Amino acid sequence: MQATASGRSRPHRVQCTAMGSEYGRIDADGTVYVKTADGEREIGSWQAGDTAAGLAFYRRRYEDLATEVGLLEKRLESGAGDPQSTRTHAEAMKEQLSSAAAIGDLTSLAVRLDALLAAAEERAGEKAAAREQARADAVAAKEALIAEAEQIATSTTTWKASGDRLRAIVDEWKQIRGIDRRVDDALWKRFAAARDAFGKRRGQHFAQLDAERGNARLAKEQLVIQAEELSNSTEWRETAEAMRELMAGWKAAPRAARDAEDALWTRFRAAQDAFFTRRSAVFANRDAEQVENQKKKREVIAAAEALDLSDPKAAQSTLRDLQARFDAIGHVPREAIRPLDDRMRAAEQRVRDAVDAEWRAASMESNPFLSELRARLAEAEEKLARARKSGDAARIVKAENEVAQRRSLLPT
């Protein structure tokens, strides 16, 4: 039978001889001892077989203890074990070592347990520090969200985007954990106050906007009425300017509510379009008439330019008729006025030059003084011809000078 931990044997006894090892022994009567730093300690009685089997039995008990310590060490080192639980377990094992019924190096096992307790204590401190740091980080994260919310509450004017952001902050807030309830409640009150302040400021903004839009609607209704009154006007220049001023006033006025703004704009634009469409139709007819007048004036100019100047007085008479026709033709496009007038003036000047030339020729033929000058010029030209035949250079120069002098006396 196996030995009991108290050293008392069960009824069946087996005779064995004394046998020992480095860390324990079994004496001749079956008493089992373990060697410690304080001396031998009786840990039981072995009566179930030979001594070697008994020593192996108690060594296995020691190995179990060592295995358990090793598991605690590995779990703590890997981070899988909770430091507090490891410490509790190690303390319990150390207390059991003084009465453990096992044969082995209990002293080194105690040293390992002391080291394990120290490591557990250190890890517990590290874990506590990590928890405190995580708590501080969580508080800092929520304070950053609060600061953002407070900035939104006091300065933002992007109402929709900011409202969406505040809702997103609530979702982010819920993901941040590790803060004690009292601190978390205080932080939440600050965030809620910022969110409420934003809501209040947004409400005030839209209330003011509604009031402004009401005033804008009234102002634009007046612009619409004025535009509708002008839409049937035929004072094209003045009304066009007035319509442009009304459009400038519309653009300068603030926007009304969207449905009112759209309806008023439809009326305003319709009044503007009605006037400018009528004006465009009138101007289109006027433009077509002016283009036709331009064509007629070109035909008159072409006739003036083609006048036969062999009889200047007849050409002058015909020109008077053409001038009358030219002046009777109505307006032409503004850009064509100057070119047409220039061509007509040129054609008129051509006829006047011909008439003037004929008058000068007639005047010269009937003037005796001019006839005498022409006769003397003819004599000088004959002398020049004779001088050139003679080849006398001095005579030629003298004759040329006389011809030039006589010719200068005649009118051009």
Image (cartoon, grey):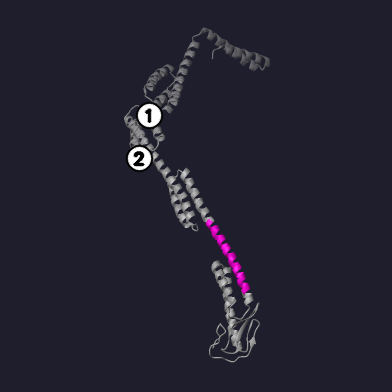
In depth, the one of 179 and 16 nearer the eye is 16
Q: Which residue is mark 1?
A: 242
Report whether 36 appears left or right of 9. right
Circle 2/circle 1 CB separation < 8 Å: no
Q: Residue at x 58, y 65 (%)?
A: 123
Q: Nearer the viewer, residue 396 or 313?
A: 313
Res 262 label: 2
Give me the residue at 64% from left, 15% from top.
387
Percent coordinates x, y for residue 92 in the rendering: 56, 72
Q: Is residue 133 magenta?
A: yes
Query: Can you tell which of label 2 and label 1 is closer to the viewer?
Result: 2
Q: Quadrant of residue 216?
A: top left
Q: Is residue 48 left or right of residue 192?
A: right
Disc number for residue 95: none
Q: In the picture provided, is 292 more to the left or to the right than 45? A: left
Q: Count the numbered circles shown.
A: 2
In terms of sequence position, does the residue under pointer 2 or pointer 1 come before the other? 1
Q: Write down the region rendered in magenta.
A: 110-135
**Amino acid type, residue under disc 2 in the picture:** Asp
Image position, residue 31 (x, y; %): 60, 86
Give, as a three-letter code, the residue at label 1. Answer: Ala
